[in-house]
Image: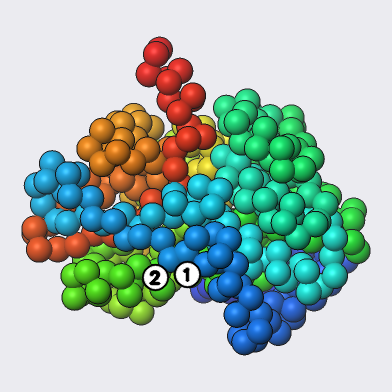
Amino acid sequence: MTERAERVETGLFGEFGGSYLPEDLQKVLSMLADEFEKYRNDPEFEEEFRFYLKEYVGRDNPLTFAGNLTEKAGGAKIYLKREDLNHTGAHKINNVIGQILLAKRMGVKRVIAETGAGQHGVATATACAMFGMECTVYMGKVDTERQALNVFRMELLGANVVAVEKGQGRLKDAVDEALNDLVENYENTFYLLGSAVGPHPFPTMVKHFQSIISEESKRQIMEKEGKLPAAVVACVGGGSNAIGAFSHYIDEPDVRLIGVEPEEAATITNGVPAVIHGFKCLTLLDENGNPQPTNSIAAGLDYPGVGPEHSYLSTSGRAEYVTVSGQESLEAFQELSKTEGIIPALESAHAVAHATKLAKVLPKDDVIIVNLSGRGDKDVAQVYEMLKK
């Protein structure tokens, strides 16, 4: 999407967020924002949302004490918020259920989505199958190759998976094509965006539906430990799992919020304020001022921008953002598998890698919650090839 548009002063987080869209598309998203505001606190909508979270997604999911990993680290207690146990294997389904219920109320029958690692695409295809909606998923060609199993899952669920060859053939390019589709077909299409990025109201919507993660973990840690965690740690690409994991702790100043980026796509660490995909955020730019190519081993973290609220949490100092290398995440992937019998997604392994380092320097009576955003089934073949080399 290349058409320039005037900024709409809504959905702002400090200087970040907003909406920079062509007029026709702005009308569509303004209508979506109105529908979201109408239903976000509607008791009937909330009851239906909670019903599907329980009966279909399988929530509440556990907050698991990683005793073996804690003992090996020799410091603070490490707990894992088990989003990997959700139906479809990741946190993505939480937001998908919320947005698909909105689409149903808006009378839309065609849903489009973008996906990197494929988990959001699988979740969207799953919900569309259940609710009888047409589904098209855009995915970078490189990602379709390294996440071939998720491509097959989506197709098995009835989705049309479009491999995007433009640009790098990665997540950014998939978002470009999904937005182009929406511009052309906005009258009959619902764009079910998977991360806490994009123009208003997407970042606010995604946070709202993903906040179930921290709602549960806050209650669970009080039941288990009788106190709040010293830190909540989550990986950050676009930022949906992290903003959900942070949400109910943002107003708890004694709880450290730590987002973990891949060194190869350290958007918050190295980015500058810029407009990408219709919103303003910290963005990795090349020497010509264009979004910079990224190359993380985790497809779901391969994005040159980040959610506007994460941009604000970083610049305001409320949250900390650190990086780990692909090698460190690969080691954490193996470590959690061997010590706890839990194979994490490569994305989640970034958070595990940093949390293990953090635990070693904190007192033993402190508690760390790691958001285990997804399971590693999708990554096993890729890791096998990497380790074989």
Answer left or right for 266 relative to 233: right
How far apart, in angstroms, are the residues tagged by discs 2 and 1?
A: 6 Å
Viewer-closest of 241 and 376: 376
Label 1 crowd bin: few (<14), some (14–19), many (20+), radius 10 Å: many
- Residue depicted at 38% across the width and 51% down the height: 372
Question: Looking at this rendering, what residue extends furthest in the front direction?
Answer: 55
In the rendered image, residue 322, in percent from the top left (x then y), is placed at 33, 50
Q: What kind of colouring is applied to the model shown? A: rainbow
Task: Check if mark 2's residue and mark 1's residue have beta carbons within 8 Å.
Answer: yes
Label 2 crowd bin: few (<14), some (14–19), many (20+), radius 10 Å: some
Viewer-closest of 36 and 219: 219
Answer left or right for 46 relative to 61: right
The circle drawn on residue 106 is none
In the rendered image, residue 383, in percent from the top left (x then y), is placed at 43, 25
Question: Which element carries disc 1, helix, strand or loop?
Answer: helix
Q: Which image quadrant is residue 345 in?
A: top left
In the rendered image, residue 85, in percent from the top left (x then y), is placed at 44, 51
Question: Which element carries disc 2, helix, strand or loop?
Answer: helix
Query: In the rendered image of this protein, does residue 148 appear above or below residue 112?
Result: above
Which corner quadrant holds the C terminus?
Answer: top left
- Residue depicted at 58% across the width and 72% down the height: 51
Query: In the rendered image of this protein, does residue 219 appear above or below residue 4?
Result: below
Question: Looking at this rendering, what residue extends furthest in the top direction?
Answer: 389
Residue type, numbered disc 1:
Ile
Q: Which image quadrant is residue 28 in?
A: bottom right
The residue carrying mark 1 is 212
Looking at the image, can residue 268 be seen? no
The residue carrying mark 2 is 216
- Residue depicted at 61% across the width and 36% down the height: 150
Looking at the image, can residue 188 be seen? yes
In the rendered image, residue 248, in percent from the top left (x then y), is placed at 40, 75
Residue type, numbered disc 2:
Glu
